[in-house]
Amino acid sequence: MFRPRTSVWNHSLAAALVLMAPFDILASLAMDIYLPVIVQMPDILRTTPSVIQLTLSLYMVVLGLGQMVFGPLSDRIGRRPVLIGGTLLFAASSIGLAITSSAGLFVALRVLQAAGASAALVATFATVRDVYAERPESAVIYSLFGSMLAFVPALGPIAGALIAEQYGWRAIFIVLALLAIIAVLRALGGWPETRPQDGSAPRTAWRAILGSAAFWTYTLGFSAAMGAFFVFFSTAPRVLIDGAGFSQLGFSLSFASAALAMIVTTRFAGYFVKRWGQAGCLARGMLMLLIGAGLLALGQVLLEPSFVSFVMPMWVIAIGIVFASSVTANGALEAFGASAGMAVAFYFCVQSLIVALLGTLFVVGLDGDTAWPLAGYATMMALLVLAALARLVAKRR
């Protein structure tokens, strides 16, 4: 039997969140904080916009696919060395990005930065699985992490713009390096190894993971939740600024209200999971997505673009996102204690591909100036997850 080393993990929930959260945030922040200076970089590095675009595209690709390397690696050598090594790589490459003036080196360093972020992210989630898999605190941690990943894209570009305006673009990467160094110093003193005591994961673990109905059901649930916010993020500026005439400040506050709805709901995530269970929370999360999608459709047909027609239905979807994301990780990973790192890697990789490909398809294929992409994505994914969940529950009876 595989047993995590929970006896050495003595942190309270609040202390654990403070310890873990920076690694969750940094992976997303490194993408979003850099966006305000993108248009300046071709001139700064004496290159083309296409090369600079690579620094965004390759970061996303390596962040997702890198977990397929670091997840199994963390199962073999432990969460702690992968976390610390990945974060140090992230910090070192961030410093390199701040001092280089070579376009080719800049692209290479972004790849290394993404690899470091990928390692830290997978080690963090594998640790949560090791320590909190059968404890109600896991719902709070996972839902809060999901809220952070949704909220960072709203605040990251603002922070990047302020830093660049005051200190120049290089300061953005210095800030990232400093944040990573602070996080890793705290981890060195307070992050014990949590990998199960009984050795490494079996080489055939990937077959069990990909053949698990529970893994696919809950991973699809996570994809539905995160994808809904991705589509909202992609369409909100066009709907609210271009369509409804919001000012930049008005848009920012409206956008932030959806993230705030997620954070407030997270406060009660543990209670919801205890009362409804994993399947009940996921089902209610998908129902909230369907209700929000219905309200978006009604608003699109009956009203002009406005806070009421677009943002308030997103509050409903945001609550559904928390209901779902509070249980999807445990639901997908609970059967893979010995290979949690590999399972986390597949979990994030599949989710990233679904969100990036399907979410983008809805934004591009439907009118991105309207609520239809969000309503369409939320409806289709929620129905798919509910069907998979019904089949899974029936199979377990």
Image (cartoon, rainbow, N blue to C red):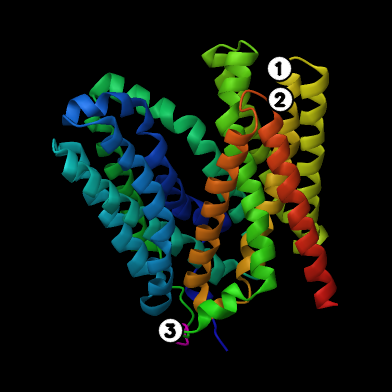
Circle 1 is placed at which residue position?
305
Q: Is residue 277 left or right of residue 234?
A: right
Is 200 magenta? The answer is yes
Q: Which mark is residue 200?
A: 3
Tell me if residue 281 can be seen: no
- For label 3, count other residues whose C-alpha is less than 10 Å away and answer few (under 14), some (14-19) or many (20+): some
Identity of the residue drawn at 41% across and 69% down = 79
Q: How many marks?
A: 3
Label ID, residue 310: 2
Mark 1 and mark 3: Cα distance apart in space: 54 Å
Q: Which callout, 2 or 1, points at the residue further toward the start of the chain?
A: 1
Q: Residue at x 36, y 29 (%)?
A: 160
- Work out whether mark 1 precedes mark 3 in sequence or the reverse, and give the earlier one: 3
> Is mark 2 in CB contact (under 8 Å) with mark 1?
yes
Q: Nearer the viewer, residue 106 or 124?
A: 106
- Please name whichever residue, 202 or 249, is drawn nearer the observer in this view of the structure: 202
Q: What is the three-letter code of the residue carrying label 2?
A: Phe
In the rendered image, the quadrant that contains the N terminus is bottom right
Give yes or no for residue 154 being in the magenta stretch: no
Residue 140, x across and y down, in percent: 64, 53
Q: Amino acid at mark 1?
A: Pro
- In whole angstroms, how far apart are the C-alphas of marks 2 and 3? 48 Å
Q: Mark 2–mark 3 contact, CB under 8 Å?
A: no
The percent coordinates of residue 282 (x first, y second) are 75, 56
Which contiguous range is marked in magenta? 197-201
- Asked if marks 1 and 3 touch (Cβ < 8 Å), the reply is no
Is residue 262 shown to the viewer in this render? yes
Element marked by disc 3: loop
